[in-house]
Amino acid sequence: MNILFILFLNFVQAEQKGTLTVKVLNVLQTQGSIRMAVYNNEKSFPSESQSFRGGALPLRPGINTLLTCDQLPFGNYAVAVYHDLNNNGKMDKNALGIPTEPYAFSNNIKVKWRAPKFQEAVFGFDSRHQEITVELKRWSAQ
């Protein structure tokens, strides 16, 4: 009986994952790559080095700007995306710490003079296939 319960529990847990697709709008150039980070707690958000999951999509003319995160456990997440124009693997900032590359966050929150908060960007992920859309912004254009 206990073995059946454990097998059932493993089956239920296996069903509690899905694919998150992030559609990125307002990509104005085809150089570099689009980088995404997925966060599952406010302590790590939005630090690039402390994301739960991440990925990059090299750009070229005509490429689709969809990023996916497979086998993501159901839960609450926040997403940060930026266009790494020079493909150096990091969000470039000027001497004042202001981003010089386009960026976006889940829920399309707009922040300018401070870092975004996890609670502003958090969304519930509870579907086998879920898509969110983010629109890249430039700090100077906000």
Image (tube, rainbow, N blue to C red):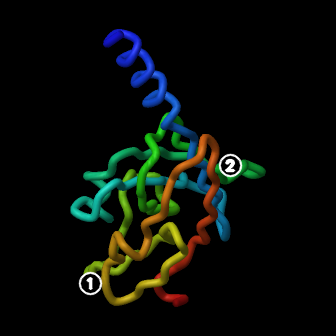
Most extreme residue toward the front is 1
Q: Is residue 116 above or below residue 83?
A: below
Residue 117, percent from left and from top: 33, 75
Residue 94, percent from left and from top: 32, 78
State whether residue 28 appears in this view: no
Image point (34%, 80%), residue name: 98
Q: Nearer the viewer, residue 23 or 29?
A: 23
How far apart in space, not on screen, are marks 2 and 1 (Cα)? 31 Å
Q: Earlier in the sequence, mark 2 or mark 1?
A: 2
The part of the image, by quadrant, that contains residue 4 is: top left
Image point (59%, 55%), residue name: 22
Residue 133, percent from left and from top: 63, 64
Residue density around tag 2, few if under 14, some if 14–19, many if 20 or more, within 10 Å: few
- Per the image, label 2 sits on a secondary structure element best described as loop
- Per the image, label 1 sits on a secondary structure element best described as loop
Residue on which disc 2 sits: 60
State whether residue 133 appears in this view: yes
Name which residue type carries label 2.
Arg
Q: Is residue 24 above or below residue 13?
A: below
Image point (49%, 59%), residue name: 124
Image point (27%, 52%), residue name: 49
Residue 100, percent from left and from top: 43, 75
Most extreme residue toward the right is 62
Q: How many marks?
A: 2
Residue on which disc 1 sits: 96
The part of the image, by quadrant, that contains residue 25 is: bottom right
Residue density around tag 1, few if under 14, some if 14–19, many if 20 or more, within 10 Å: few
Q: Assign the N terminus to one quadrant of the image.
A: top left
Name which residue type carries label 1.
Leu
